[in-house]
């Protein structure tokens, strides 16, 4: 890729002025003037004349955890997430001196202080009346794909400029900080054709560093645009910009999301749809996106800090769920939290009566599996796509999908459906897979309405009684229990072996290499629970990405970077497992899960052939009709009757609890590719490794200037929002 295709700005942006009655540096509060409806959007004023009298070292540690920011502004707002000023209300939790911080025992106090700050922040904000402008919510029309889209348009360059910003909003009624793109949540839908070039100028006006990963895209020839901090790039610091540019050589349903810390859980994500020319022959009339996700009422950085703390074994439990960024909680279920549902509406999906329709369902969440169904539609759902791969239409009564997975279904109205008739789309968190109690129903719902295009029909909707005495909302009716189906109680992939891609592609008959991989969460030093792949727990070096080190080493002729297989010379194996291929190879991965929990593993840059998966220990290649180590078929076995016959291809496949997974991929895409659990808390704990493909090609690479400039920013800025290093807890007395 030509270096001119990327751009980087090293100069911080000028602060924006805003009304003096809201002097918060780090978050915008979207407010509506009750008398005029005028929107007031906070800026970044109020720093002049403010002194940070607190301990700088302590401030930096909390900043790395995403719990602190510059002090300044009005006392009430700044105490929401700021801990820098002794005069702040947050000091009611206590203050640490430099001498105390240098004492290892004080780190225990620091951890307690962090929790106190979060708790006090919630109490402070819950008492503050805020009129939220519904303008941050993305309208339903933004999830509808272009009805007049030109599938045969010549390739073009589609340009986007996105401003990443912090605001305080209430997607489900509970106020919390979120991350938006251009002030909207969720992020905008990207729609393009196969063969197009896309250019995203990312301007980071947020509090912490960030990056964008384009989930499921191959990035063939543009590995440095993959958006994984510490793997392919340095993150984009606050006040800086970076441009992603690449050409689309695939089609299907994808998404983009932040890949720094767990920021995707704070709202930085959106759908990415790539059209193929063959779509013009599709038998559906409309095409829409349905995003489902788990939702937390606290910042991901604070939750990650707690998850990575000594003695913490369970992942944070979601507070609820959203469909297309919306839901309505019962405020009474969340005492002590500032909650207002008066301006919230039920998400809606409107479809013309009398024709089939495509729904692209994407799990943009970071932890929960979802059981998605539509009341009254058990016999009229046809699965047509899995993770960007078109499949033969397969009847389904519901969709079960894990984090990072996507499915498309074609929906046909049930017989005798009347114009304006409503059905509930239900996205139900599978609670059996979560340790802890999900508040409320754990369900998000959207209204599916069939409309007569010749007339306008006013849809009825459930009523919510509001007022100072918070009353419970009238709940929708329970879904019917189909005689041949049961609610999902397991978090594992749907019948992968039954889905047949079109066009058909057989898996390669012989694997050049087969890697046995054990994945698990376990407790190590200082009682820290971390994720492991073959005993290695990944710690990304955000200031020195693996890709940069490999390219530099190969360019300099350093033989340590030319080692094929597990490279223990160039990389520190306990925290950086890198497997290299020096040419095109067919690679098998036999993954064994030693945990009771499930792990949806996502491979950047590739689609994997899912050959088999199951419960218990891997039974061996022979039980599948394959020779040991995948070296072909057993005698008498034919490809057309084997697991190699047109298996499902996908980029995110699940290893069920105490189960196994066998996948095969052709390592022909040059670059450094991240392979990790897509549960945010597991990835943040280190459950990931990297594949270096085609070293023979990479040795001729030179990193683009824009990527190198990004890494030249001071590490204190690059690392903002990064999880704490394990050494942070050393000698704390908490282990």
Image (cartoon, rainbow, N blue to C red):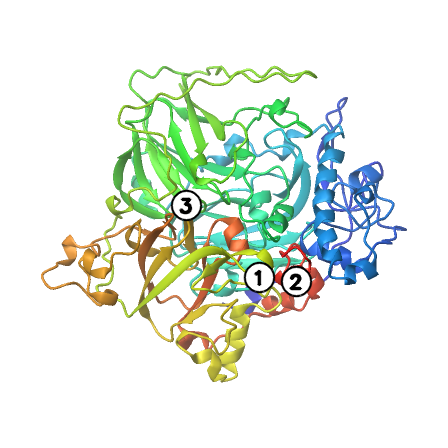
189 relative to 568, above or below: above
Spatial CA distance of label 1 from label 2 is 9 Å
Picture coordinates of residue 180, whole percent (x, y): 62, 43
**Can residue 516 be seen from the camera position used here?**
yes
Return the mark for residue 730.
2
Picture coordinates of residue 522, whole percent (x, y): 49, 56
Relative to 394, 126 lies left or right: right
SS for tag 3?
A: loop
Q: Disc 3, disc 1: CB below 8 Å?
A: no
For label 3, the crowd category at 10 Å Cα-Cα, with few meaning under 14, some 14 to 19 and many 20 or more, is many
- For mark 3, what is the residue? 405
Relative to 97, 456 lies left or right: left
Spatial CA distance of label 3 from label 1 is 33 Å
Q: Residue at x 59, y 51 (%)?
A: 311
Q: Residue at x 61, y 61 (%)?
A: 726
Return the mark for residue 525.
1
150 relative to 665, above or below: above
Q: Earlier in the sequence, mark 3 or mark 2?
A: 3
Picture coordinates of residue 490, whole percent (x, y): 37, 39
Furthest-right residue in this view: 49
């Amino acid at each position: 890729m030509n270096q001119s295709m990327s751009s980087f700005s090293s100069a911080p942006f000028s602060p924006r002025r805003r009304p003096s009655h809201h002097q918060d540096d780090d978050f915008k509060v979207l407010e509506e003037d009750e008398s005029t409806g005028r929107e007031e959007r906070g800026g970044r004023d109020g720093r002049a004349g403010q002194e940070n009298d607190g301990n700088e070292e302590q401030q930096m540690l909390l900043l790395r955890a995403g719990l602190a920011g510059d002090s300044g502004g009005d006392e009430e707002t700044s105490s929401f997430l700021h801990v820098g000023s002794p005069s702040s209300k947050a000091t009611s939790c206590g203050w640490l001196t430099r001498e105390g911080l240098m004492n290892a025992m004080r780190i225990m106090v620091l951890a307690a202080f962090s929790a106190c700050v979060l708790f006090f922040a919630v109490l402070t904000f819950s008492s503050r009346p805020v009129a939220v402008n519904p303008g941050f919510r993305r309208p339903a029309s933004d999830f509808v794909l272009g009805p007049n889209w030109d599938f045969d348009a010549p390739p073009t360059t589609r340009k986007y400029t996105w401003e990443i910003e912090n605001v305080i909003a209430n997607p489900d009624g509970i106020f919390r900080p979120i991350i938006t793109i251009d002030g909207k949540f969720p992020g905008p839908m990207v729609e393009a054709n196969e063969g197009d070039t896309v250019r995203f100028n990312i301007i980071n006006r947020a509090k912490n560093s960030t990056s964008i990963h384009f989930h499921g895209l191959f990035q063939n020839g543009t590995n440095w645009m993959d958006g994984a901090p510490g793997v392919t790039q340095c993150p984009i610091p606050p006040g800086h910009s970076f441009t992603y540019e690449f050409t689309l050589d695939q089609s299907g349903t994808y998404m983009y999301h932040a890949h720094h810390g767990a920021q995707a859980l704070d709202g930085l994500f959106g759908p990415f749809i790539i059209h193929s020319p063959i779509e013009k022959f599709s038998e559906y009339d409309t095409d829409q996106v349905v995003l489902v996700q788990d939702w937390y009422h606290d910042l991901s950085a604070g939750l990650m800090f707690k998850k990575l703390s000594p003695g913490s074994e369970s992942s944070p439990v979601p507070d609820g769920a959203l469909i297309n960024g919306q839901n309505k909680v019962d405020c009474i279920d969340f005492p002590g939290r500032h909650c207002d549902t008066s301006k919230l509406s039920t998400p809606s999906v409107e479809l013309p009566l009398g024709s089939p329709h495509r729904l692209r369902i994407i799990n943009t969440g970071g932890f929960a599996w979802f059981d998605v169904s539509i009341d009254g539609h058990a016999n009229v759902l046809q699965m047509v796509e899995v993770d960007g791969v078109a499949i033969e239409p397969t009847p389904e009564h519901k969709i079960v999908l894990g984090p990072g997975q996507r499915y498309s279904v074609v929906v046909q109205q049930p017989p005798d459906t009347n114009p304006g008739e409503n059905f509930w789309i239900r996205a139900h968190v599978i609670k059996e897979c979560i340790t802890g109690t999900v508040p409320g129903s754990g369900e998000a719902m959207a209204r599916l309405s069939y409309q007569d295009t010749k007339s306008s029909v006013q849809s009825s909707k459930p009523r919510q009684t509001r007022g100072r005495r918070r009353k419970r909302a009238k709940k929708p009716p329970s879904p019917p229990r189909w005689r041949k189906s049961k609610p999902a109680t397991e978090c594992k992939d749907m019948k992968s072996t039954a889905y047949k891609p079109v066009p058909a592609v057989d898996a390669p008959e012989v694997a050049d290499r087969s890697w046995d991989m054990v994945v698990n969460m376990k407790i190590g030093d200082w009682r820290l629970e971390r994720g492991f792949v073959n005993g290695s727990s990944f710690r990304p070096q955000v200031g020195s990405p693996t890709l940069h080190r490999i390219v530099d080493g190969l360019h300099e002729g350093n033989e340590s970077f030319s080692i094929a297989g597990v490279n223990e010379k160039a990389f520190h194996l306990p925290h950086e497992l890198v497997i290299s291929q020096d040419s095109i190879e067919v690679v098998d991965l036999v993954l064994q899960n030693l945990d009771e929990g499930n792990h949806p593993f996502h491979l950047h840059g590739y689609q994997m052939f899912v050959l088999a998966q199951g419960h218990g220990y891997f039974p061996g290649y022979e039980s599948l009709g394959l020779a040991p180590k995948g070296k072909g078929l057993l005698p008498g076995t034919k490809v057309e009757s084997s697991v190699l016959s047109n298996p499902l291809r996908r980029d995110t496949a699940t290893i069920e609890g105490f189960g196994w997974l066998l996948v095969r991929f052709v390592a022909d895409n040059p670059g450094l590719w991240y392979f990790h659990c897509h549960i945010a808390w597991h990835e943040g704990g280190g459950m990931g490794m990297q594949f270096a493909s085609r070293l023979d090609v990479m040795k001729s690479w030179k990193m683009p200037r824009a990527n190198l400039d990004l890494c030249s920013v001071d590490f204190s800025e690059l690392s903002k929002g990064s999880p704490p290093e394990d050494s942070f807890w050393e000698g704390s007395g908490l282990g």
